[in-house]
């Protein structure tokens, strides 16, 4: 019997690495057009996880998410990565699970100013419920809307920051790929959930936060939250192997393991369902 498959997608290498730490028996598979996936087991669960690094931006995310869905036929799609906080009560290191994703760059430029024409995709009810069960008792996990655009927000005084405050006041975080993933999975009739670790405050301090290693820590927490969701989620069908089959790979690849002590973000060690680990390579700037 084929194991049920969940696809976990990331934009950055450090996000990919954070998820891969949780998998065992990893093998590589490759789509005929070159897209690569690392497929492994999530111990203690029925899930086989297909992990794919998509690259940055909503357009790329949408195109490659559609490819992964049609190729591997996952029962659930999770997008895992880092984001900037838009709310003062959400700290660096917290995790935001998107109850809905706003696409923020649609609109009309008029003589009276820019009129927004937003789009929004709600999280899969099934995946959202699994997240609520898995993360209910964790004060650092927030189920809130997320805004997804096509630029990096690094100024709280910018026109974009003002637009978000005026028209997307319930958005707790901002990022660059969630709208692409959510729209692609919606059109495919599937279940999607966006999970983001907070690496900065989307303001002038972003570069300083990145230099301090906030991205790997946030990515590790988002990966831990995603694993907690999958441990709670029960398969509802037997996932198909996909057109090319998950066995069309290039052989097994050993699981990467990164050591290090637990990081203390607020003066005390965090012992929730997801734990940040020190990652040796910092990854690219976001």
Image: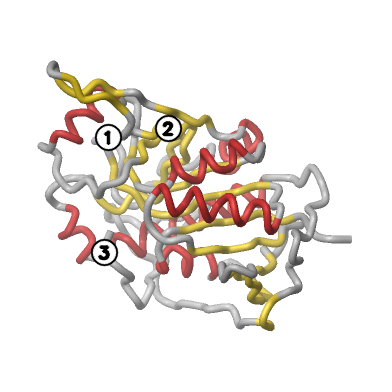
The picture places residue 12, in percent across and down from the top left corner, at 40, 63
The residue drawn where x is 76% and y is 57% is 46
Residue density around tag 3, few if under 14, some if 14–19, many if 20 or more, within 10 Å = few
Q: In the shown orientation, is residue 153 left or right of residue 182?
A: left
- Number of the label disc, if any, that sits on residue 285: 3
Horizontal relation, residue 214 to residue 24: left or right: left
Label 2 or label 1, whichever comes before in sequence order: 1
**Viewer-nearest of discs 2 and 3:** 3
Q: Is residue 147 above or below residue 207?
A: above
First in sequence: mark 2 or mark 3? 2
Instruction: Classify 60 as above or below 246.
Output: above
**Quarter of the picture holding the N terminus:** bottom right
Q: Residue furthest right?
A: 1
The residue where tag 1 is placed is: 87
Which image quadrant for residue 148?
top left
Q: Which residue is mark 2?
A: 144
- Front in this rendered view, residue 156 or 57: 57
Quarter of the figure with residue 40: bottom right
Q: Residue 48 location, x and y as percent?
A: 71, 61
Q: Is 166 on the left or on the right of 259, as rendered?
A: left
The reply to whether discs 1 and 3 touch (Cβ–Cβ < 8 Å) is no
Residue 242 location (% of width, % of height): 75, 59
Q: CA distance from mark 2 to mark 1?
A: 11 Å
In this view, the residue in front, 130 or 152, is 152
- Asked if residue 233 is positioned above or below residue 167 in the image, the reply reads below
Element assignment for label 3: loop
The C terminus appears in which quarter of the rendering?
Answer: bottom left
For disc 1, the neighbor class at 10 Å (few under 14, some 14 to 19, many from 20) is some
Residue 75 image offset from top left, x and y in percent: 71, 48
Image mark count: 3
Helix, strand or loop for disc 1: loop
Task: Report how far apart the C-alphas of labels 1 and 3 lie in the structure.
Answer: 22 Å
């Amino acid at each position: 019997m084929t194991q049920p498959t969940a696809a976990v997608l990331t934009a950055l290498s450090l996000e990919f690495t954070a998820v891969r730490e949780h998998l065992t028996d990893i093998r590589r598979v490759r789509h005929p057009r070159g897209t690569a996936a690392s497929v492994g087991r999530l111990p203690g669960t029925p899930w086989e996880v297909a992990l794919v690094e998509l690259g940055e931006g909503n357009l790329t995310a949408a195109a490659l998410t559609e490819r992964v869905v049609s190729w591997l036929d996952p029962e659930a799609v999770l997008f895992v990565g880092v984001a900037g906080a838009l709310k003062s009560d959400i700290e660096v290191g917290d995790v935001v699970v998107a109850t809905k994703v706003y696409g923020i760059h649609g609109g009309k430029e008029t003589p009276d100013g820019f009129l927004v024409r937003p789009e929004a995709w709600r999280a899969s009810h099934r995946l959202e419920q699994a997240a609520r069960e898995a993360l209910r008792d964790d004060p650092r996990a927030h189920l809130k809307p997320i805004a997804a655009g096509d630029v990096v927000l690094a100024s709280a005084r910018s026109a974009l920051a003002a637009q978000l405050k005026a028209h997307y006041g319930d958005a707790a975080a901002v990022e660059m790929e969630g709208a692409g993933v959510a729209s692609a999975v919606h059109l495919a009739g599937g279940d999607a959930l966006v999970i983001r670790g907070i690496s900065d405050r989307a303001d002038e301090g972003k570069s300083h936060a990145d230099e301090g290693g906030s991205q790997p820590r946030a990515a590790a927490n988002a990966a831990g939250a995603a694993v907690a969701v999958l441990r709670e989620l029960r398969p509802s069908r037997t996932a198909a192997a996909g057109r090319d089959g998950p066995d069309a790979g290039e052989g097994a690849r050993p699981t990467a393991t990164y050591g290090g002590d637990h990081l203390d973000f607020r003066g005390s060690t965090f012992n929730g369902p997801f734990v940040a680990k020190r990652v040796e390579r910092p990854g690219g700037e976001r």
